[in-house]
Structure formats: structure tokens, C-alpha cells
Image (cartoon, rainbow, N blue to C red):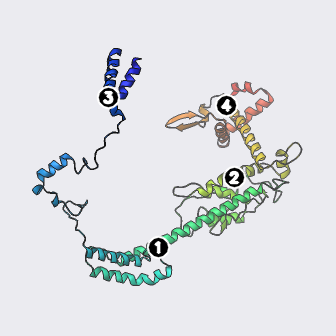
């Protein structure tokens, strides 16, 4: 009850301290005062506009009366003061100055080829008046009064430079639009390649030779530096192109009109760039636009997985035997990707288990030479994900012949003597 009384008193602007009888007495006294509670229904009084502001406040008037000469407001400054210097007094413009400035502005607009309504004039009219109006502007500026800037040859050069820059920007925009259109058409082509049925995806071999382990351009890394001559082929020299063209194209490619090995979609200085090397050309660098590659890199990576998986098989029947249903039907594009991803997860898990088995469950073993460690925020950590551990383990087997030999011996012993892999931990170094 007391809290309710305090809320009511607070609503009426009355003190809320005291006992319950005192609060009730305050409310009764307030209810008897008709003028007090009747004021609650009246609108709040508003001050008159301009009564007390920064210019007409009492302190401002007192200062003006005390320090202004004569104490009269008639001596106010006519023109505004300059913000650049306190010593400079802005000169009030006369009617003659305004007329001269208006004529000069009209001459400038005419020189720039702009109509009175600020709409651009036709190119023919602008070219005809460009040379004559500059002289007229100079003569007009010499004969007119008041501070104005003459149209000098430097201004004309600046205008010409601006026009050239705008033309260059327009050409760049047109080139970018054309490139995006080409990428869109290429993406549509790639999307259409997976739709035909049957078969959904057909593979063919140019020759009976197996696919090489490395592509022709993998022997020498492709440069992505931006500091090159204007006539040089970006990121790929003529020597590498010649070496590529001289190499027999016996690699097994996807024959769904997929230009993985030979493509004319990307041409640099007259040289066709195969799709498999696009990742080297579209790498992100500072200042480069990557919108086109963002729209393409996902599909490019998926096709890369399929091509790499195809290169592991000697021929098409072997590949399709692995990527077919129990009824002998060939899997579609997405089903192949799903099976490849599942196989990679299984392979990574097995390789990670082999690494733990070889090092006795201790990836920080001194013989690993820190291959399973990484640094983050200045702190060293041990790899835990199967994919990362498997990648480091495969790198060790490739770069450390001694570890590779010991692992082969351990595998032979495992299959010959101890088939239980759990008992192999005692044989780890």
C-alpha cells in the first residue's frame, strides 16, 4: 500500500518520504488544492521563439551594451567574416560584380559544352566551340573587374586529361562486363555438361598410355607477379608455352566438352590457357578484382577432384567399375563427388591411424622433427584433425626415406607376424 501511495505522489510531483499516514495526508492536502491538481490538465507553457538564444540572451545583450561603441546595434558587420584569416574582411559584392560573375560563369559552361539547364551539349557543338570559347574567356577575364580565375592552357590540358581518363574508365568497364559475360557463358557450359543422360558423364582416353603424374606446366611454377613488361605474357612465358605445345597431349581427359587439357575460354597474348591452370592465374593478389574467380572457383575445384581421381585409373572401364551402381549404371556428377569425398575421409582416417601407430601414439616424437606441430598466436600446438595429420604423415613418407623404409618394414611385420594392429604399438620407435 505504501509503495502505491509513493507512486501516486511521484506522479503528481510530491515528496515520497515519510510514513503511511503522512503520505495519505499529503494526498488529501493536494486534492483540496484545486489550482494545484487542476494544473495537471493544462498544457505546458512554451517560451516565445527567439526570447533566449545565443544571440539574444541576457549575457549577450549585457556584453554588447558594455563593450560596443555607442551601444547601438546599427554598427553590425554587413558582410560575413572570413574563416581563413581574422585580418581579411570580405568585400560586399555590387550589382556590377554579380553581372560580371554571371557572364563569366556562362562563358565557362559554354566552354565545357554544358547548356544553361546543365545538360551536356552534343559532341559536335562542343568540338566547334572548344577552341573559340577559351580565347573569349581569357579576353573576358582581362577586361572584367573583380577577382576571377582565367581559363589558361593548363586548364584546357586538365580538361582533356579528364576526358581521356573517363574514356579509359569506360573501356575498362566494357572489358570487365565482357569478361563476366564470358565467365557466365562458361559456367553455363559447365553446368550443361553434367545434364546429358545417358551417359551422364563419359570419359575417353586419347591413347592407351596412362595419364602422367604431373602436368607439363607443373615442372616449373607459374609466376603470378604483377611486375612484368607490357608485351610479356602474364604469369606464363613464351618458353613455357612452347614447351607445352611441343609436349604430346596423351593425357586422359574428360570428354564431356570439358576443356580441362585444351581450352580457348581464357586466352593471354594469343596463348590458350587450359582450365587446369586457371587456379594459378586467378590467385588473389593485392589490388586485383576477384569477382570472376569467386563465381567459378567452386565448380573448378569440383572438376579438379574428378580429374585427379580419374588419373588414378588405367582406363575408363576401371574408373566406371568403381563409380557405378550395383546394377552397372554410371553415377552422376554429384554422386561421384560424394563418393570421392567419402573415400578421402576414410583414407585420411587410415593414414592418421598409421601415423599414431608408427610413433606409438606420440606425434611429438623426436623422430618426427616437429612435422605434426603448428604455430598459432605465438604458441605451438599438435595437429589433431585426421586430415591434417594424414597430410603431414604422407609428406613425411615422401620426404623422409628412412621413415618410409621403417614403415614398410613395420607393415610387412604386421601382415606376416602380428595381424592385430593394436599390438604394434610396442614396435614403434
Q: Which mark is residue 155?
A: none
Q: Which residue is mark 2?
A: 299
Tell me the mark number nearer the camera, choosing from 4 and 3: 3
Q: Picture coordinates of residue 275 (x, y %)?
A: 69, 58
Q: Reading the chain from its start, which is encountered first: label 3 or label 2?
A: 3
The image position of residue 310, as x and y in percent, is: 77, 50
Left or right placement of residue 326 versus residue 121 in this view: right
* Nearest to the observer: residue 427 or residue 5: 5
**Which of the 4 image quadrants contains residue 234?**
bottom right
Name the residue furthest left: 70
Q: Name the residue carrying label 1.
A: 119
> Mark 3 or mark 4, which is nearer the start of the sequence?
3
Which one is in front in this view, the residue at disc 4 or the one at disc 2?
2
Gap in angstroms between the C-alphas marked 1 and 3: 70 Å
> Which image quarter is the C terminus in?
top right
Distance of label 4 from label 2 (alpha carbons)? 35 Å
| Chain-order first, disc 4 or disc 2 | 2
Do the CB atoms of the residues marked 1 and 3 lie less than 8 Å apart?
A: no
Q: Which residue is mark 3?
A: 34
Tag 1's secondary structure?
Answer: loop
- Given contact means CB atoms under 8 Å apart, are the residues at marks 3 and 2 in contact? no
Labels 4 and 2 touching (C-beta < 8 A): no
Q: Is residue 244 left or right of residue 288?
A: right
Residue 94's quadrant in the figure? bottom left
* Left or right, 220 with reference to 323: left
Amino acid at each position: 500500500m505504501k509503495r502505491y501511495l509513493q507512486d501516486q505522489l511521484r506522479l503528481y510531483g510530491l515528496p515520497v518520504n515519510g510514513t503511511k499516514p503522512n503520505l495519505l495526508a499529503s494526498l488529501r492536502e493536494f486534492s483540496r488544492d484545486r489550482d494545484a491538481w487542476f494544473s495537471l490538465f493544462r498544457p505546458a507553457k512554451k517560451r516565445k521563439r527567439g526570447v533566449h538564444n545565443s544571440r539574444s540572451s541576457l549575457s549577450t545583450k549585457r556584453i554588447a551594451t558594455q563593450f560596443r561603441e555607442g551601444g547601438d546595434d546599427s554598427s553590425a558587420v554587413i558582410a560575413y567574416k572570413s574563416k581563413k584569416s581574422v585580418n581579411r574582411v570580405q568585400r560586399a559584392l555590387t550589382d556590377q560584380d554579380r553581372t560580371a560573375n554571371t557572364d563569366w560563369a556562362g562563358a565557362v559552361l559554354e566552354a565545357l559544352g554544358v547548356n544553361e539547364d546543365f545538360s551536356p551539349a552534343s559532341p559536335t557543338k562542343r568540338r566547334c566551340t572548344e577552341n573559340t570559347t577559351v580565347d573569349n574567356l581569357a579576353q573576358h577575364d582581362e577586361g572584367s573587374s573583380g577577382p576571377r580565375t582565367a581559363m589558361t592552357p593548363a586548364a584546357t590540358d586538365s580538361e582533356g586529361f579528364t576526358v581521356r581518363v573517363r574514356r579509359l574508365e569506360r573501356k575498362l568497364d566494357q572489358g570487365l562486363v565482357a569478361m563476366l559475360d564470358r565467365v557466365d557463358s562458361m559456367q553455363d557450359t559447365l553446368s550443361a555438361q553434367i545434364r546429358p543422360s545417358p551417359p551422364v558423364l563419359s570419359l575417353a582416353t586419347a591413347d592407351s598410355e596412362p595419364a602422367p603424374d604431373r602436368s607439363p606446366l607443373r615442372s616449373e611454377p607459374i609466376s603470378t607477379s604483377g611486375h612484368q613488361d607490357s608485351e610479356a605474357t602474364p604469369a606464363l612465358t613464351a618458353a613455357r608455352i612452347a614447351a607445352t605445345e611441343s609436349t604430346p597431349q596423351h593425357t586422359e581427359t574428360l570428354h564431356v566438352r570439358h576443356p580441362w587439357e585444351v581450352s580457348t575460354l581464357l586466352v593471354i597474348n594469343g596463348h590458350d590457357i587450359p582450365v587446369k591452370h586457371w587456379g594459378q592465374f586467378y590467385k588473389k593478389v593485392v589490388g586485383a578484382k576477384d569477382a570472376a574467380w569467386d563465381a567459378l572457383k567452386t565448380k573448378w575445384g569440383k572438376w579438379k577432384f574428378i580429374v585427379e581421381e580419374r588419373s588414378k585409373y588405367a582406363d575408363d572401364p576401371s574408373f566406371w567399375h568403381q563409380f557405378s551402381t550395383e546394377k552397372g549404371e554410371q553415377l552422376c556428377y554429384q554422386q561421384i563427388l560424394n563418393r570421392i569425398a567419402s573415400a578421402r575421409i576414410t583414407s585420411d582416417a587410415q593414414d592418421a591411424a598409421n601415423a599414431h601407430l608408427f610413433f606409438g601414439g606420440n606425434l611429438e616424437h623426436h623422430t618426427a622433427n616437429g612435422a605434426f606441430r603448428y604455430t598459432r598466436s605465438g604458441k605451438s600446438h599438435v595437429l589433431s584433425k585426421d586430415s591434417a595429420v594424414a597430410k603431414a604423415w604422407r609428406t613425411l613418407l615422401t620426404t623422409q626415406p628412412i621413415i618410409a623404409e621403417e614403415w614398410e618394414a613395420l607393415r610387412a611385420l604386421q601382415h606376416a607376424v602380428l595381424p592385430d594392429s593394436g599390438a604394434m604399438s610396442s614396435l614403434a620407435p
